[in-house]
Image (cartoon, grey):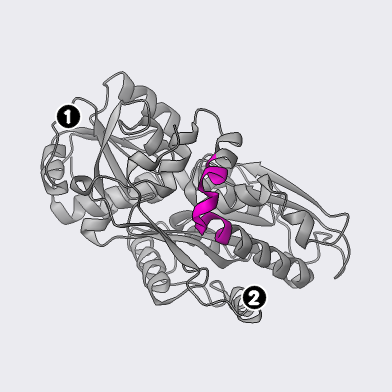
Amino acid sequence: MTYTKKWWARAAQKTLLASLLLLQGEHFARAGDQGYGKVGQPVHLVVGYQPYDTVSYSAAVIRGLALWKKFLPAGSEVEFQAGLQGSIIVNQMLAGKQQIGYLGDVPAVLVTTKTEQAKVKLVVNTGFSAGQRCNVIMVRADAPDFKTSQDAIKWLDGKTIATPKGSCADRFLGNVIDRTHIKPDAIMNQSLEVLSTNLRAKKLDAVALWEPTASRIGNLVGEGIAKYAITGYPFDIPDSGYIAMRDDFMTQRPDVVKAWVKMEMEAQRFILDPKNQLKVAEIVKGQTTGITLRMAWFSIYGAIPVTAGGSPIRDEKPFVFDERVHKQLNSIYTFLHQSKVINVGEAPVGSLDDSVARAVANEAGTSLPLGSIKAQDIANAPK
């Protein structure tokens, strides 16, 4: 089977657009339809985040430490809604049911292009890695111990692989296959839960997915049903995460937007501080099911084996959209447009807006990027 951009487009469109069809009949909120109150007044926010994705760990920290009580007007309320995949949050934001969403790079790009339904902006970068978060391919536990990622890629030829279609992991898998010209026997569209079950039953040879599920099913700190084999690092394919906000909300409550960006910066600093690593892992464990303390820690602080494409840096926090971030986002717009998943080849005007993040960092006298996380030996993982 040939895994081309055309094939990827059909599969991705089927998954992404099918979910968007669920919104038919919904009332799409326009500026003025939602009552966000006046500047300084208490606000009720609904925030979509993915505790099963390291791009949302700052949101988990905000929730776990109740930072919003420190930054938002007194009497405000925040409802955190967990989603297993970014497309769920995209749908909720477009329907006006969430004002803020934490998204991986592919759904983040997608949501900015649905301007006929709602205008959504990306306002903060939540993480940028050398393909260590979502650009991960794992092989079944009884696969050979590969000396390099290139050896693992050759082994994938003729094999059965699964990934959630329309995700950042799916895009990475497609990029790898396009570059290497291997021909898997089958590429299955399966959710994280299903692919984990099928991998355990040895119905799959490999999976493309993201952290912390990779840590959960892996043989280093997890269930031992899979092994890290390939990441984006050897291919120079990074991955990243973003905070998206509805434009009508931003226009009506600039005070709340700025307050949220301030607390996001505090949350990212909390994650970067080495003395908080155990607490971060505890917070993530408390907001997930099946993720242990060791899994949560390894997913953002642990070192992936060098033979599998492990990078010396596990994650970085640019906070704003620097040159690297723009380059990566532009590549995704181009890829999705060429694959006919979106109808534009670049970001809609004004949709990439880190002006508030830059202002917050400047007012605080904070140098950017905020910092990076050096990948640590597994011996440092909590017991």
Relative placement, left or right, of 146 versus 47 is left
The dot on residue 214 is none
Up-down: is 324 above or below 61? below
Q: Residues within 10 Å of mark 1 (few under 14, many from 20)?
A: some
The location of residue 176, given as percent across then percent down, is 22, 52
Q: Are marks 2 and 1 in contact (CB under 8 Å)?
A: no
The location of residue 349, given as percent across then percent down, is 54, 77
Front residue of 147/376: it is 376
**Which residue corresponds to mark 1?**
143
Residue type marked 2: Val
Q: Indicate yes or no whether the magenta region holds residue 272.
A: yes
Residue 249's image quarter?
Answer: bottom right
Report the Cα–Cα distance between label 2 and label 1. Answer: 48 Å
Front residue of 63/22: it is 63
Q: Residue furthest top?
A: 201
Q: Is residue 196 visible?
A: yes
Up-down: is 63 above or below 33? above
Q: Regarding mark 1 in the picture, which secondary structure is present there?
A: loop
Quick one: label 2 or label 1, which is nearer the N terminus?
Answer: 1
Relative placement, left or right, of 12 versus 254 is left
Q: Indicate yes or no whether the magenta region holds residue 275.
A: yes
What predominant SS class does the magenta segment belong to? helix
Q: Regarding mark 2 in the picture, which secondary structure is present there?
A: helix
x 66%, y 43%: residue: 81
Q: Disc count in the image?
A: 2
Residue 227's image quarter?
Answer: top left
The location of residue 243, given as percent across then percent down, is 58, 60
Over which residues does the magenta segment extend?
268-281
x 41%, y 49%: residue: 301
**Which residue corresponds to mark 2?**
360
